[in-house]
Image (cartoon, helix red, strand yellow):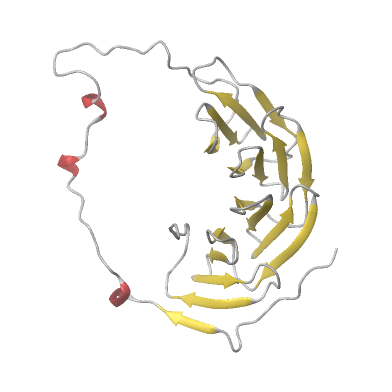
Amino acid sequence: MNVASPVHDEGQGEDFLDESDIINEYDVDEEELPDADDEGGSDGEEDVVDDSIHIFTGHTGELYTAACSPTDPTLVATGGGDDKGFLWKINQGDWSFALEGHQDSVSCLAFSLDGKLLASGGLDGVVKIWDTASGDLRCTLEGPTGNIEWVRWHPKGHLILAGSDESSVWMWNADKAAFLNVFTGHGSSVTCGDFTPDGKVICSGSDDATMRVWNPRTGEIIHVVRGWSHLFALASWF
């Protein structure tokens, strides 16, 4: 397997952020937030249980992740500490497919934008690709030696991106089960990441308090942004 060499920061642009870079802060008045008891009905009315609501009971351990299909409003995937994933059909009975094969907890899930594939990442360090129509395993993608923290799909195809707690980001072609590139340079667990909407740039955030911007073809670092104590999520680019 050909792995791209680590690219260091020398010569790359860097930004340092502090409180002066905050655009707006918004205070939330908790009194304006609806209470759970406020939904449906006024004071004095008995709660009515909707018979169309189903409780899914496939998992035998804690749930760590859930994802909704972008093309099928009834299709939901879940994964958890029982080393399994499930595909569910909302309001259509119990689970449709059990996604078995991980050797440790299923930590993250993501549907491809066309809804045809589901990626599951595990604490076993592998990403599995599933056919959402049949529940069949399409391929297993290997390479990282640590836990998979998150998975994301390319906005225009079946390229899959995954972040690991061993400081790297990996990219594969899911249709061909082929490794494409690895992005190294973070100094700690890569806790979040994504493609930009045009698919031409990758951004990743880490416990090393940096966000790094990458060229997906070459693996080179385009830019480094420093200034947070840690990063758990990246805001949408839209």
Q: Residue 57: percent from the left, percent from the top?
A: 56, 20
Judging depth in this view, the residue of 161 and 8 nearest the camera is: 161
- The reply, left or right, for residue 28 in relation to residue 10 is left
* Relative depth, front residue between 225 and 172: 172
In the rendered image of this protein, does residue 160 appear above or below residue 60? below
**Residue 209's x, y, as percent?**
49, 70
Query: Looking at the image, which residue is at 80% across and 49% down?
Result: 177
Horizontal and vertical percent position of residue 161: 65, 56
Q: Residue furthest right?
A: 1
Q: Which image quadrant is residue 25 in?
A: bottom left
Give the left or right position of residue 235, taking residue 148 as reference: left
Residue at figure coordinates x 49%, y 82% from the top left: 14
Q: Quadrant of the N terminus?
A: bottom right
Q: Nearer the viewer, residue 191 or 70?
A: 70
Q: Name the one closer to the observer, 123 or 175.
A: 175
Q: Quadrant of the C terminus?
A: bottom left
